Amino acid sequence: DVKVTQSSRYLVKRTGEKVFLECVQDMDHENMFWYRQDPGLGLRLIYFSYDVKMKEKGDIPEGYSVSREKKERFSLILESASTNQTSMYLCASSRGGQPQHFGDGTRLSIL
Amino acid sequence: LAKTTQPISMDSYEGQEVNITCSHNNIATNDYITWYQQFPSQGPRFIIQGYKTKVTNEVASLFIPADRKSSTLSLPRVSLSDTAVYYCLVLGKGGYNKLIFGAGTRLAVHP
């Protein structure tokens, strides 16, 4: 069974902090994704990666960066957290065009 | 990406069969139909995927007519734990997919 693990379920940070969200998958998937989910806006893609050290911008990359140094790990970085980045963050992974498998999410609050 | 339309909400009772229909009029030849389930405060969970006719797994069945312009997710004998939001997506098989989750169908199962 595919396991996508996000480092924290809940996180509270302050405005201006640099925030790291970590995601690890155990199925040797080449594709990894970061989404945020907000009420009324659905799931929106922030960044994705199709290989180690490769990354592509999604629909809402502003204010975020990512890092993929190892195949199993994909990190999302909020360079300088702002209150409008309070959200549920979801990591997913997939092999090729196969269905994506999600982690349980990190509910991030920026105060 | 093909746009999908599904009911906003449905109600059912324990033990009943639930059918959720999704329309996708402009589905492309190489698109697959994929369903996800999401519980509150959790990431979406892949349920089933199909291309045509019928697909069945241990959780659900997916019925796709010959024209593929719609599909029906069938949940046999639902229980209270099936209360969730169900999303229908149409995805290409190659490479990687940017998932676009609409509002989904909020299923409430009552005792």
Image (cartoon, coloured by chain):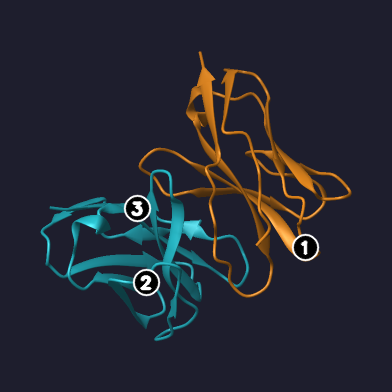
Q: In the rendered picture of this protein, how many numbered marks are placed on residues? A: 3
The answer to whether marks 2 and 3 sit on the same chain is yes
Q: Real-space Cα distance between discs 2 and 3?
A: 18 Å
Residue on which the image places disc 3: A105
- Residue B93's x, y, as percent? 69, 67
Residue on which the image places disc 1: B28
Q: Which chain is disc 3 placed on?
A: A
Q: Which chain is disc 2 placed on?
A: A
Which sits in the foreground, A103 or B70?
B70
The answer to whether marks 3 and 1 sit on the same chain is no
Rendered residue at 54%/65% (across/down): B98
- Residue B43's x, y, as percent? 42, 49
- Residue A35's x, y, as percent? 41, 61
Describe the element under mark 1 as helix, strand or loop. loop
Instruction: Name the amino acid, label 3.
Output: Gly
Closer to the eye: label 3 or 1:
1
Instruction: Name the amino acid, label 2.
Output: Pro
Instruction: Please determine whether, in this image, residue A36 is positioned above or below residue B22.
Output: below
Instruction: Please determine whether, in this image, residue B56 is positioned above or below residue B111.
Output: below
Residue on which the image places disc 2: A61
Rendered residue at 55%/41% (across/down): B104
Describe the element under mark 3 as helix, strand or loop. loop
Is B24 on the left-hand or right-hand side of B15? right
Q: Which chain is disc 1 placed on?
A: B
Chain for colour orange: B
Rendered residue at 28%/71% (across/down): A63
Instruction: Name the amino acid, label 1.
Output: Ala
Chain for colour cyan: A
Closer to the eye: label 2 or 3:
2
Q: Real-space Cα distance between discs 1 and 2?
A: 28 Å
Rendered residue at 26%/65% (across/down): A21
